[in-house]
Image (spheres, rainbow, N blue to C red):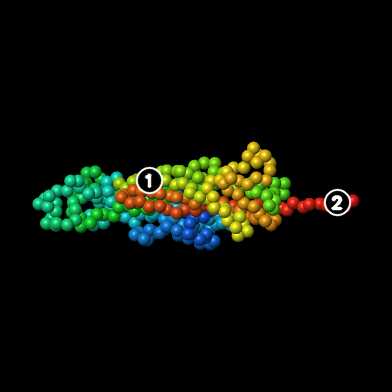
Amino acid sequence: MESLTRPQQRSVVLSVIAVVLAIFSGICNVPVASGDPECIRYEPKRGVCLVWIDGAPGPGMPVLVVAPDGPPQPCRFNGYEIPCSNAVGYWSNRVEAWCTLRVPQPPLSDSAWGGNTTGAIYLCTRPAHSGIPDPAMVVTRWLPAAPEAPDPETIAWRILAELDLESPELGVFPRGDSAQRMGFVGWNVWLWAAADSDRQWGPVSASQSEGGVSVSLTARVTSMTWDMGNGDSVSCGKGTAWTLAATGGKNVASPTCGYVYEADGRYTVRGSSTWEVAWSGGGQSGTIPLTLSREAEVIVGELQTVSVNR
C-alpha cells in the first residue's frame, strides 16, 4: 500500500478526530455554525486556528474539532518539520537550535557575551540530520531575546478539549416525552441536572507540559439555566431529583428548581450548564467561559373536567 504524505496523514487524523471528539452543544459567546467550520480559538503568533466549530449534525448540536497535538508547527530544519519546543528548549531560527537559558549566567567578562551587555546566554542544542536533538551538538550562544515559549493559554485550551466535557443529562418530571408521561398545565415540573459523571458536572482537573511550561486546569459547573421553550427561563444550581417519597405523588413544588406551565403544547426544553474553567501555568492564569447545552422535548396537556347532567 502506498504510504501517505505528511499533509495526507494530517488530513486523515483531523477527519477521524472530527468524528470521535465529544459533541458539544454550545460555547459561550460563540454562534453555532451552520455551514463552513468557524474558528473559535485563533493563534495570531503563528496564524493558525487551534479550535473550530464544524457543521452541526443536528439543531443546536455543533461539533468541537481540535487540531491534534496543537497548531501546525512551522519550524523546519534541513527539510524536516520539527517541534518548536521540546525538553531541551525553544527553537531559535537565529541559531537553528533549541535553546534554554543558562543558569547561572556567566559574568559579562565571559567571551560568550561577545562584548554584548544586554540579552542573555543560552545553551543551544542543534538537531541531527533526522531533525531530533543531538546531545553531542550543544553550544553556548548569546541571544538578544529569549526564543518564543509556548503560550500557556493555548495549552489550557488544548487540555480543555481533551477533557471531553458534556452538558448534564436533563432531569425533568413529569418527563413529558410521551402521551402516557405528559405533564399538565398548572402542575409543578421538577428540573435537575442528572449528571452521571464528573465530565457532566465536575470538578475535573488535568495538567499538561510543553517545552518546559506546565499548565493545570480545573473545570466545574457553576449554574444551570433552563429555557422552557416558551420564552421563560429558570436559573438554578444542580437542582433536586424528583422522587415519589418526596412528593407522595402529589403536586408538590421542587425545593430548588422548578417551573409551572400555564398553557398546553409541545415545548423544547434546553438546559445549559455554565462552566468555570480555571487554568494557571507559565506565570499566568485565567478562566475560559464555557456553556454546554442539551435539549429535551416536553409534552404538556390540560386536564379536562367532565360534567354529567342527570
Indicate the position of residue 302 as horizontal and vertical percent values: 73, 53
At 52% from the left and 48% from the top, the residue drawn is 237
Residue drawn at (19%, 46%), measured in percent from left and top?
103
Query: Which residue does the numbered mark 1 point to in the structure image?
Result: 216
Give the x, y percent position of residue 251.
67, 46
Query: First in sequence: mark 1 or mark 2?
Result: 1
- Compared across the picture, whether 255 is left or right of 132 comes to right
Q: Which residue lies furthest to the front in this view?
A: 310
> Which residue is nearer to you in this view: 130 or 97?
97
Q: Which mark is residue 18?
A: none
Residue carrying label 2: 308
- Is any part of residue 226 visible from this angle? yes
Comparing 139 with 193, the one in front is 193
| Label 2 packing within 10 angstroms: few (<14), some (14-19), many (20+) | few
Q: Label 2 sits on what residue type?
A: Val
Q: Do the residues labelled 1 and 2 touch (CB within 8 Å)?
A: no
9 left or right of 124 in image: right
Please report the residue visible at 83 percent of the width from the left and 52 percent of the height from the top: 307
Secondary structure at numbered mark 1:
strand
Label 1 Cα crowd, 10 Å radius (few <14 / some 14-19 / many 20+): some
Asked whether residue 5 is in view, the answer is no
Q: Nearer the viewer, mark 1 or mark 2?
A: 2
What's the CA distance linking mark 1 and mark 2?
A: 70 Å
Q: Which amino acid does label 1 sit on?
A: Ser
